[in-house]
Amino acid sequence: MQDLAGKHIVLGLTGGIACYKSAELCRLFVKAGATVQVVMTEAAEQFITPVTMQALSGRTVYTSQWDTREPNNMPHINLSREADAIVLAPCSADFIARLVQGRSDDLLSLMCLARPMDRIPLLIAPAMNREMWAHPATQRNLMQVAADGATVLGVGNGWQACGETGDGRMLEPAQLLEDVTAFFSPKLLAGQKVLVTAGPTFEALDPIRGITNHSSGKMGFAIARAAREAGAEVTLVAGPVHLPTPRGVTRVDVLSAQQMLDATTRAAQSASIFVATAAVADWRPATQSEQKIKKDGSGRTPVLHFTENPDILLSVAKSERAQSKKLFCVGFAAESENLAEHAKAKRERKGIPLLVGNIGPLTFGQDDNALLLVDANGVRELPRAPKLTLARELMTEIAARLPDWRV
Ligand SMILES: Cc1cc2nc3c(=O)[nH]c(=O)nc-3n(C[C@H](O)[C@H](O)[C@H](O)COP(=O)(O)O)c2cc1C
């Protein structure tokens, strides 16, 4: 997806092992539609060559403020004025300290200092050894650069090139792409707390087997990501799925419908928007065998009895918070036929302001989907598109409905 189409990014590399990840980051920015101008410190050139970065960005790399290629010999002015953002990845401890002091003794620091702060944001992806990261000087400097207007994207945790394990790794390129994309997104849901359920539930028959469904969780995860991009604080209650947690989202993993209800009810107490995408099992086995149900050789098959599961959407929609219009509830209906009819009926049954219909077999496991939005005013179709695109459109639709619904 061309999430960064039309954006021009100055990608600044400073001296650290994580420069090897910057090659991939540059590629991802370009793939996402951005143009990328790479600027490197002298130390960064010890870790990766400008040739690699030039080949990946398709532009000659700048490393010196004395570069005579610019007619006015001021690359720090010219390159920074063109940028939609300066992204420092990796950003060394040393470079953070230089930013704090307002130093400008090389091209990249000079460019950061000379940038018009009101229109050219500075995003920082630190990378360093865990002791360097934990040092009070580094933490103090990070607080200062943030106070001076930079956005610090955080660090990862894990094995480090020095052989130690801990905080301070540079975030992975895909995570940085997600963060930079979110940074550019309009903050339509700023101040909102969004709760999303996603994926299937798993209703155990015995310790080995259970009943589940084909929901992949992709739609709900896309919604959680889109809500976070739109500036919301997001909690994602996820059934058993194998999907990475979207950046900046709090995830609660559950298995059964009852566990999903418990986690959702808790989170709903402070949420302002609830989007129920999970494909919750309608029934669960009435009893759960403590041991594996075995064949006994007689040819007889086990007889299963079922109990109805709690209706999570209905339960949240009937809560005091939803009834007093503090919680905007959005339901999803996965149908196999007569979508508009079923979706309208479900919206009324649940008493919610917005119901989103989709055709189950055409969405489960797929990367794209088509949605039908049903509210009190009628029906609107969002044509087939990637789930993330639809999720972003849905956030826009929700944001547009909130002011009228709340009065
Ligand atoms: C092998 C090696 C690896 C290094 N890795 C890092 C690192 O990951 N993070 C960091 O902040 N500094 C690291 N340093 C130290 C920086 O390269 C050094 O502070 C340098 O002055 C940074 O310059 P710059 O900020 O101008 O790029 C490393 C040094 C060496 C020799």
Image (tube, rainbow, N blue to C red):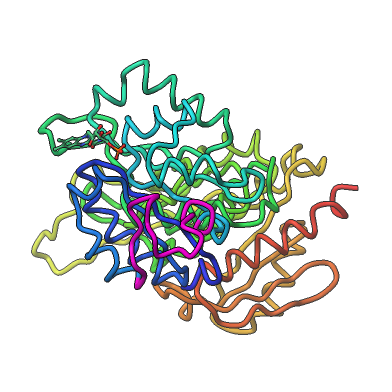
Q: Nearer the viewer, residue 218 or 311?
A: 218
Compared to residue 221, the image places residue 160 above or below, namely above
Farthest residue, direction top: 136
Quadrant where ligand 1 appears: top left
Residue 322: say if magenta: no
Could one spot residue 231 in this view of the protein? yes
At horizontal 51% and vertical 66% (from top left) the residue drawn is 4
Asked whether 158 or 95 is in front, the reply is: 95
Along the line of sight, the residue nearer the viewer: 223 or 79: 79
Q: Residue 5 vs residue 315: left or right? A: left
Residue at image location 61% in from the left, 54% down from the top = 275
On the image, the x and y values in percent for residue 373 come to 70, 72
Across the whole image, how many numbered discs are drawn on residues?
A: 0
Magenta span: predominant SS is loop
Q: Which residues are magenta?
A: 58-79
Instruction: Relative to 397, say whether 252 is above or below.
Output: above
Q: Position of residue 47 (x, y in %)?
A: 18, 48
Residue drawn at the location 40% of the way across and 32% of the way down:
96
Residue 23 placed where, x, y %? Answer: 27, 60
Q: Residue 366 appears in which quarter of the rendering? A: bottom left
- In the visual, does 113 lie left or right of 108? right
Q: Is residue 282 visible?
A: no
Rendering coords of residue 169 (x, y %): 27, 38
Query: Quick check: 373 left or right of 165?
Result: right
Which residue is at 42% across, 57% downward?
177
169 vs 405, nearest the viewer: 169
